Every structure is written in C-alpha cells, then in structure tokens.
Amino acid sequence: MKMIDTSQAAKSILRVTEDLIRIHSTADRTDELYHAIQYVADYFSDLPELVIHRYESNNKPSIVISFEETLEPQVMLVGHVDAVPAPDELFEPRYESGRLYARGACDMKSEVAVMMTLMRDFYSASPRPSLALMLTSDEEINGNNGARYLLHDIGYRAKVALVPDGGAEPSRIILKSKGVLHLHIGVRGRAAHGSRPWLGKNAIEDLYALYEQIKTLFPPTDDPEHWHSTCIVGTISGGVATNQIPDFAECGIDIRFTEEHALVDILSKIRAFAPDADIEILSKGHPMFTSRSNQFVMLYEEAVRTLFNVPELQEEITHGATDGRFFAEFGIPVIVSRPVSDDQHSPNEWLDLASLEDFKRLYERAITLFLR
Ligand SMILES: [Zn+2]
C-alpha cells in the first residue's frame, strides 16, 4: 500500500470515529441510539447495490449491511454503536501522544468505523465477498434486543463472526468467555417457636442446604487461569426473630459457567434439587467457546503473522462477555480481538492511532483468507 493511500485510509476511519463518538449513544438516550444507526445508514446511502436492513426491538435499533440478500453471509462483522454513560466532555475526541481518548475510543466506535470503511472498500471488489456488517445498539446493557434478536428472531447466521470488542491488541485474541446465570431462589418453611423446632420447618436451613447442593455442581479446580465454573451466593435473607423458626428464606446466586455446562442442564439440575423452591432467572447468558485450532482462528493467525512481526497468537482469558456469545450459542466460531487499546468504560479509555489502520489491514487480510 502506498503512503498516500495509507494516510487517506486513516483519515477516513478517524472521520467516522469522531462522528460516532460525538453521538451520545448511551442506553438512556434512545434518540441518540437511533441517531447513531441513522448515521451508519447515511454513510452507505451512495452505494446503490448494497443491501441494508434496519431492525428494531423494544426501541433498540440495529442495522445489517451486506452485498447480497442473505441471512447467512460467510463472514459476519459484529459491532455495537452504544457506549456506557460518561460525562459530556468524554464525548469529544481528544488526541494525545499518538492516542485517541474518548468514551467509545476502543469500545467500540473506532472499530465500528474500521468495519464501515472496510465494507466500503469491499464494495468495490469484484466479485464482492460474502460478508456482512451487523451493528446493534444494546450490547452494553444485555444484547437481547440487538444481537440476540437478530440471531434468534430474524435468523442471521454466519460461518464465522469477527467481534472487535475485547482483548488489548490484534494478536491477543479472546476465544472464550463464561456463561452467566443469576438466580433468585425462595424457599418456604413452616413457622414455629424456637423452643419447639420439631413443629416447624426451617426455611433458612433448607435454603442453605440447597445452596450447598448447588455448589457441588461446580467443584473448584486448581486451574491457575480459573477457567472453571463458579457459584457464589451474593444476597441472603429470611426470618424475623431469633426465637422463631423462619417460614421463608431467599437468596441471590451468581453462577459463571464454562463450555462444559449447558445453561438448561444447570437449571434442570437445580430445579431437581428443590422442586418446591421458587426459582427465578434474573439474567442469563451463554458461554462462548471457539477452539484454538479452529480453521478460521488458524487463518486469522496467518494474517497476524504475515502483517505483524508476531510469531503466534496469544490467547487472553476474559471474565466479561461480548455479543459474540449469541453467535456461539449457534455453534458459530467467534474471534474477539481489538486494536492496541485499553481502559474501556473508564475516563481514560484510549486507542493507539497507529494501530487502527493496522487493524483494518488485518481484518481485510483475514477476511480475504477466510473466503479464499
Ligand atoms: Zn463493547
């Protein structure tokens, strides 16, 4: 690539990045979520052969852009235009020492800009690749009306999903994240005076015994990276007086599970332990797991090796999650990586500017290898 092209490419990515950052697209500002999705639609409005579909679910807009009418492109680029809330001044891009600082600098308006400009570039390719860009607006709250809706209700699928929403540099990829299950459990007992326990049924003791049983599903291991399922009790209450057998007790538990467990199995086992308990799902999410030896991971690695002076990919462990989990649920391999960047969700969120264009070249190369 010639120098002049390079700087022009960088400029167009940055122009889109800045525009997106200035849109205060946080979950509490529905208008701005629509504004951001509209910006994306406008950006592509001069490309007549592009297939653009807009969706909304419970006031969360999303958009999918592709080169053909299909729900199943080979490669899906996945991003979100929402950001976590921040003081107004963080919605103004700031440059310092080769870095861009702003809310959304790396999570993930720069990456969205990279993918948008990439779609524009591939539009001029002949033939055009089987590639689509899916942008949602609710990743930071739960993804239910964005990626989950588009996969479960609309029916989008892909052979591989690229999700530039985690990791700290392009060669450090995230291939797995744990599933999450938050439960509220209520147990009924029978009240009696503390001096005559044989007349009652102690709900606190029953709840605690149930919790101990649930814990046996997730035995601790000595894995130093802690890639194992866990279960903790976060809240507990019950009883009204020291001298009274409590007739009710409740707790909130937080389960994080690896690919070794399936969400439905966990739930059915817990329900089998205590058929009479009142069990409510507060939130849930599936784990994400892509094998290190998956063909697309190997091709991504090839792209990293040929473009950067890096001998091999590093795999990072994350205890958070991305929209990639909704693809993983359907067995679609997901590769999560990011330009050199850090401190997302903090006032110092930053992205290395030189890395931005490298990242675009990497994606371009990887996509070309995927579709070869
Ligand atoms: Zn994100």
Image (cartoon, rainbow, N blue to C red):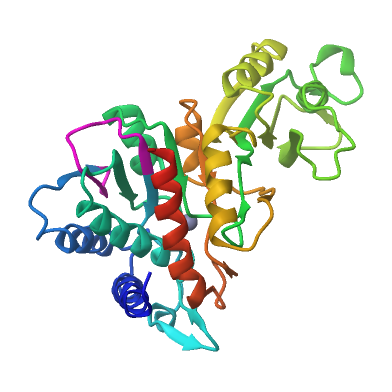
Q: From the image, which quarter does the N terminus lie in?
A: bottom left
Residue 307 picture location, percent across and down: 53, 60
Where on the picture, by quarter, is residue 210? top right
Asked if the stretch drawn in magenta spans residue 72, the answer is: yes
User: Residue 104: in sight, yes or no?
Assistant: no
**Residues in magenta, as a range:** 57-76
Q: Nearer the viewer, residue 247 or 304?
A: 304
Q: Position of residue 88 (x, y in %)?
A: 39, 80
Is the residue 30 above or below the residue 236 in the image?
below
Please determine whether, in this image, residue 40 is positioned above or below residue 262: below
Residue 271 % position (x, y): 64, 15
Residue 52 relative to residue 288: left or right: left
Q: Residue 227: tell me if it is visible.
A: yes
Q: Quadrant of residue 54?
A: top left
**Residue plotted at (60% across, 22% down):** 278
Q: Is residue 205 above or below residue 138?
A: above
Left or right, residue 346 beside residue 68: right
Residue at (57% x, 19% y) in the render: 264
Q: Give the left or right position of residue 149, taking residue 349 as reference.
A: left
* Residue at screen point 72% across, 13% down: 273
Viewer-proximal residue, 333 or 37?
333
Farthest residue toward the front? 2
Taking the spot 56% from the left edge, 40% from the top edge, the residue there is 297
| Quarter of the figure with the C terminus | top left
Horizontal and vertical percent position of residue 301: 58, 47
| Residue nearer the viewer, 51 or 166 | 51
The answer to whether residue 312 is magenta is: no
> Nearest the camera: 227 or 172?
172
* Residue 39 picture quarter: bottom left
